[in-house]
């Protein structure tokens, strides 16, 4: 058995204050250390319980499922790459960065540190040519992240008894629909006169509409957790909490797209808050409202679900992006590229214009992750300028996110 001992000593002096002896005291503090360790573990568990309870069962379960998915994908990537490969490292980084972003969105702070360390390891592999690819070490580190997700999952299921995915359930077995819509359709069917063709058509039309809406969710509900996290992020950045407007134009998204949209807009809203919106002082100096505004407009047309995101911040630093691209060897000095081509370099792997790396940004992965997630589902994202200041180093713009129309329905 391992013992923990505490040593302390006191001098024994003569009448001339000369130390003649030392009195050494030895105490067995094994039990005390054990109790301290248990108290520390209980305190941490209580902190985690508090974090979990601040998140709805449904949102928490979505987070756990997506985290397991990203961890499993990273494990497969590491096992399939016996040597260093920058494309593989980029995917590892993207997945871990998304787990961290989602954890921060929901305030799961005890998870953030371990995930951040793993993300940092991938970042060093990506940037340091001398750093060696150690497959076993990477798998062991990933196992720590997996164990942490397990810990949160177990506390939620066992300690809190919040098993299962909440109200939505498995989208493969259960579909959600507003009960008022079902009730209205039933009333129309009952009220329709058998011999009245117009009544029958109206009833069938309403039933068809109801069936189309089964298994869908309003976009503002999907993004609610991310929107709710913006005030704390704003405080961290020294900015005012933004006003966020979502114009869905009667369009709802299918449950299968919910995880994708959460991952995408976790990055996009945080990016807008960090890089786009200025501090209250800077906005006032520019004659703006001290509170910034982020706007999302949704449309469904020509076989595409289109989401346009813009803010009233400082705009896109096209000149700075060009210079950064030259510094990184992406562009040659004097090479001619259109402003749109320059702007879309922000989606390149590892590209960032941040002056310094922070918990929020600067690693050049957010926009790369967004494009990767969307392209995997047949979608895309691009920059579209909204001003006529051609040649200016700073341009107003919007992000145009597209997905196949199968992911949405017009209500």
Image (cartoon, rainbow, N blue to C red):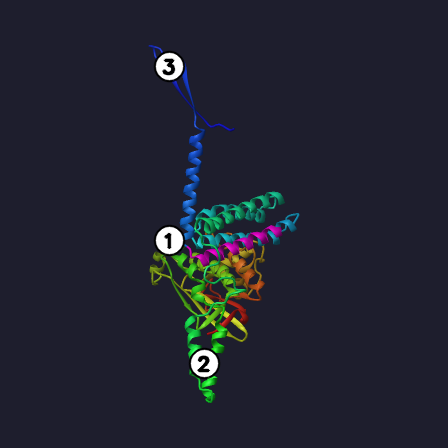
What residue is pinned by disc 1?
235
Bounds of the magenta span? 55-77
Residue 100 sits inside the magenta stretch: no
- Sequence-earlier tag: 3 or 2: 3
Q: What is the number of the mark on residue 105?
A: none
Q: In terms of secondary structure, where does tag 2 sit? A: helix
Extreme residue in the top direction: 15
What residue is pinned by disc 2?
189
Give above or below for 200 relative to 178: below
Q: What is the number of the mark on residue 12?
A: 3
In this view, the mark in front (3 or 2): 2
Query: Looking at the picture, how far across and down is residue 137, in whole percent?
Result: 59, 43
- Sequence-earlier tag: 1 or 2: 2
In this view, the mark in front (1 or 3): 3
Q: Does 300 sit left or right of 88 as displayed? A: left
Residue at (48% x, 27% y) in the render: 3
Query: Looking at the picture, how far across and down is residue 139, in whole percent?
Result: 59, 46
Helix, strand or loop for the magenta stretch, by majority: helix
């Amino acid at each position: 058995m391992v013992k923990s001992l505490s040593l302390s000593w006191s001098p024994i002096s003569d009448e001339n204050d000369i130390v003649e002896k030392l009195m050494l005291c030895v105490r067995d503090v094994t039990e005390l250390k054990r109790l301290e360790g248990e108290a520390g573990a209980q305190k941490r568990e209580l902190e985690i319980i508090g974090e979990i309870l601040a998140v709805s069962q449904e949102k928490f379960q979505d987070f756990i499922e997506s985290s397991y998915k990203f961890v499993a994908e990273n494990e497969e990537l590491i096992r399939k790459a016996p040597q260093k490969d920058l494309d593989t490292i980029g995917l590892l980084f993207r997945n871990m960065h998304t787990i961290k972003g989602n954890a921060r969105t929901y305030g799961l702070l005890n998870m953030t540190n371990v995930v951040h360390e793993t993300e940092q390891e991938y970042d060093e592999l990506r940037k340091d040519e001398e750093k060696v690819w150690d497959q076993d070490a990477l798998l062991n580190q990933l196992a720590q992240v997996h164990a942490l997700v397990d810990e949160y999952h177990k506390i939620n299921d066992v300690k809190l008894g919040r098993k299962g995915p909440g109200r939505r359930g498995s989208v493969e077995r259960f579909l959600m629909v507003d009960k008022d819509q079902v009730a209205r359709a039933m009333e129309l069917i009952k009220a329709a006169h058998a011999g009245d063709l117009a009544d029958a058509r109206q009833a069938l039309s309403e039933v068809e509409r109801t069936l189309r809406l089964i298994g869908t969710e309003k976009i503002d509900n999907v993004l609610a957790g991310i929107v709710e996290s913006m005030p704390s992020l704003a405080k961290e950045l020294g900015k005012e909490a933004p006003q966020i407007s979502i114009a869905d134009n009667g369009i709802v998204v299918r449950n299968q797209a919910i995880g994708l949209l959460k991952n995408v807009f976790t990055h996009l809203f945080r990016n807008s808050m960090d890089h786009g919106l200025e501090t209250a002082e800077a906005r006032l100096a520019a004659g703006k409202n001290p509170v910034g505004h982020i706007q999302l407009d949704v449309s469904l047309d020509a076989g595409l679900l289109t989401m346009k995101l813009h803010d009233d911040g400082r705009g896109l630093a096209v000149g700075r992006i060009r210079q950064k691209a030259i510094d990184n060897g992406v562009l040659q000095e004097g090479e001619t590229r259109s402003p749109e081509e320059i702007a879309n370099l922000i989606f390149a792997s590892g590209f960032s214009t941040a002056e310094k790396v922070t918990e929020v940004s600067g690693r050049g992965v957010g926009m790369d992750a967004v494009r990767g997630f969307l392209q995997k589902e047949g979608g895309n994202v691009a920059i579209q300028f909204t001003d006529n200041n051609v040649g200016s180093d700073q341009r107003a713009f919007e992000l145009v996110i597209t997905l196949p129309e199968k992911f949405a329905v017009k209500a």
